[in-house]
Image (tube, helix red, strand yellow):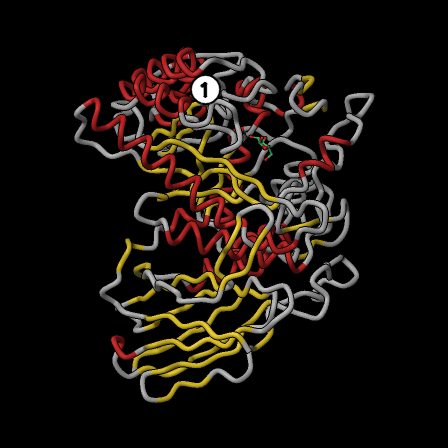
């Protein structure tokens, strides 16, 4: 059996575990909002029409922030359509997803939902078809207490206290030619800077995110970030990254190594941001909001015919994830944690039905996709500080990324509870991996639970009828002795091993 080893040492601290790493995303897209989070008449619907089953799963998932309302949708959205009496709200054509938006859910409903779900909102403004003034109006509606047109309207609409939204995205994917109001980097950078400056005048406490590239394969990747930050460096706190991965042509080995691409992506954006900082002589450091990431079978979506009519909440982007998707997603989360020194916020795209960990039937059941599990377990157990573990691992060859280590891992340690947690992926498509962990620097520790997400069929999926086909199971045979912890990681597996001091 192949062998790998790593060291757990509290001195190898990367950064704190940022709770915002465990954000997700709710877009007015497909069935994410309608029949996703909101479905009046559903047997579990509460007094506001929110599905309690989805709220419960959202809490169980451990979500911390939720980005809203898009995504591509936001680039054509008029936020005022979604406030006031529901029956008076206009129906609009949503060009981004070729759908009809009924505006039954808008800002105030979403904010009510965030309070019920116990999550922090992350609001996006439309910089596609709109600009500075509309962003200011929205901010005034949300964050000013009272005594102005928009704040008093909010109060009249039933929300006495300001929504107090702290984190704001200045548009979405403005580098993408598919985006309504697509712009050059210079055009967008100037607009983002002007919008951000004006927003800060209204509320200096905001945290602002400038759009980075829609992906590292965009032709303008790198120059886009440099130009946008040249214009907006002093105004923003974050630059965004977006990345989606899928298995192409049965190339499982490359797919499982998607985190290698994400590592490189993050390093490149950090290098660009830091070189702009040096050029400008700026004190402040720009961090990354990785506010869209996931497994997404995008090529299937691009090859599908768009709907001929303009349906309300059609089933769009409803990927049904298998075990290998979940292992890959767990690996991407390991990567985000490993970069906690610069990735201080992230959003799994998306939350319900649309490339999502939670699925629902209209009028019926809700269930956990395979990808739910690594996210929920990492969100629940990654606490305290992130530790670099420097795995020494056998490698294998992948078509896309060349030679990659079979083992990918990161750890967290919570000095308060004395818990150290190792998150580890075995990327081998066929062989188990024997892992030895040097724990001597932690002092005396004992294993305190180990789980694995693995199984004989890497393409097994969950469904409403078989919701627990893929779920975490105990990882057998984990033993600690004389400062070494030993475990055997199954092929194509995501694993979590907890240790407790003492
Ligand atoms: O998450 C789905 C879509 O992916 C978002 O609307 C867009 O921002 C990205 O291209």
Give the total number of marks visible in the rendering: 1
Rendered position, 235 above or below 112:
above
Q: Position of residue 18 (x, y in %)?
A: 35, 50
Q: Position of residue 216 (x, y in %)?
A: 49, 33
Residue 160: name its quadrant. top left
Of all residues shown, which one is farthest toward the right?
308
Which residue corresponds to the image point at 69% horizontal and 34% vertical from the top-left?
30
How would you rate the neighbour count of disc 1 (Cα within 10 Å): few for under 14, some for 14-19, many for 20 or more? some
- Residue in the foreground of this view, choosing between 141 and 201: 201
Identify the image quadrant of the C terminus: bottom left
Looking at the image, which is closer to me, 60 or 190?
Answer: 190
Answer with left or right where residue 469 lies relative to residue 389. right
Which residue is disc 1 drawn over?
Answer: 153
Q: Position of residue 456 (x, y in %)?
A: 71, 70
x 41%, y 68%: residue: 422
Q: Is mark 1 within 8 Å of ligand 1?
A: no
Image height of 378 relative to 148, above or below: below
Residue sitting at x 49%, y 19%: 126
Q: Can I make out residue 77 in this image? A: no
Residue projecting furthest to the bottom: 481
The answer, for residue 440, to whether it is visible in the render is yes
Q: Is residue 146 left or right of residue 328?
A: left
The one of 498 and 267 positioned closer to us in this rendering: 267
Secondary structure, mark 1, is helix
> Ligand 1 falls in which quarter?
top right
Q: Is residue 330 above or below residue 475?
A: above
């Amino acid at each position: 059996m192949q062998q790998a080893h790593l060291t757990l040492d509290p001195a190898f601290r990367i950064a704190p575990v940022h709770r915002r790493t465990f954000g997700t995303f709710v877009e007015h897209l497909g069935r994410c909002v309608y029949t996703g989070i909101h479905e009046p008449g559903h047997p579990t619907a509460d007094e506001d029409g929110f599905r309690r089953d989805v709220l419960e799963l959202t809490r169980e998932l451990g979500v911390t922030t939720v980005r809203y309302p898009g995504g591509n949708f936001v680039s054509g959205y008029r936020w005022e359509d979604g406030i006031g009496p529901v029956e008076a709200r206009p129906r609009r054509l949503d060009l981004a997803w070729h759908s009809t938006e009924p505006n039954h859910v808008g800002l105030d409903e979403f904010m009510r939902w965030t309070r019920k779900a116990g999550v922090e909102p992350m609001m996006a403004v439309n910089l596609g078809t709109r600009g500075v003034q509309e962003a200011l109006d929205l901010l005034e509606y949300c964050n000013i207490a009272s005594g102005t047109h928009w704040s008093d309207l909010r109060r009249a609409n039933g929300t006495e206290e300001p929504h107090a939204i702290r984190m704001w995205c200045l548009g979405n994917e403005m580098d993408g030619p598919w985006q309504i109001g697509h712009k050059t980097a210079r055009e967008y950078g100037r607009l983002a800077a002007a919008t951000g400056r004006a927003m800060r005048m209204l509320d200096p406490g905001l945290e602002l995110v400038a759009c980075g590239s829609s992906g590292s394969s965009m032709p303008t990747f790198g120059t886009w970030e440099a130009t946008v930050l040249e214009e907006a460096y002093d105004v923003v706190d974050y630059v965004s990254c977006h990345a989606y991965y899928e298995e192409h042509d049965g190339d499982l080995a490359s797919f499982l190594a998607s985190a290698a691409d994400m590592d490189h992506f993050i390093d490149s954006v950090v290098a660009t941001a830091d070189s702009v900082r040096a050029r400008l002589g700026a004190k402040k450091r720009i961090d990354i909001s990785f506010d869209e990431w996931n497994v997404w079978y995008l090529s299937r979506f691009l090859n599908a015919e768009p709907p001929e009519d303009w349906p309300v909440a059609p089933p769009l982007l409803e990927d049904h994830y298998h075990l290998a998707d979940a292992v890959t997603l767990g690996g991407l989360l390991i990567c985000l944690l490993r970069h906690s020194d610069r990735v201080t916020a992230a959003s799994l795209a998306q939350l319900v039905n649309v490339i999502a960990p939670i699925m629902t039937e209209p009028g019926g059941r809700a269930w956990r996709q395979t990808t739910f599990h690594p996210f929920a377990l990492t969100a629940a157990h990654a606490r305290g500080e992130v530790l670099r573990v420097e795995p020494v691992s056998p490698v294998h060859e992948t078509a896309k990324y060349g030679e990659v280590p079979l083992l990918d891992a990161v750890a967290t340690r919570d000095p308060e509870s004395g818990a150290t947690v190792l998150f580890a992926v075995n990327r081998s498509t066929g062989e188990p991996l024997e892992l030895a962990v040097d724990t001597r620097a932690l002092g005396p520790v004992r294993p305190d639970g180990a789980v694995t997400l693995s199984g004989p069929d890497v393409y097994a999926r969950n469904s409403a009828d078989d919701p627990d086909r893929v779920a975490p199971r105990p990882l057998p045979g984990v033993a600690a002795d004389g400062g070494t912890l030993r475990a055997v990681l199954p092929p194509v597996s995501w694993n979590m091993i907890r240790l407790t001091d003492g």
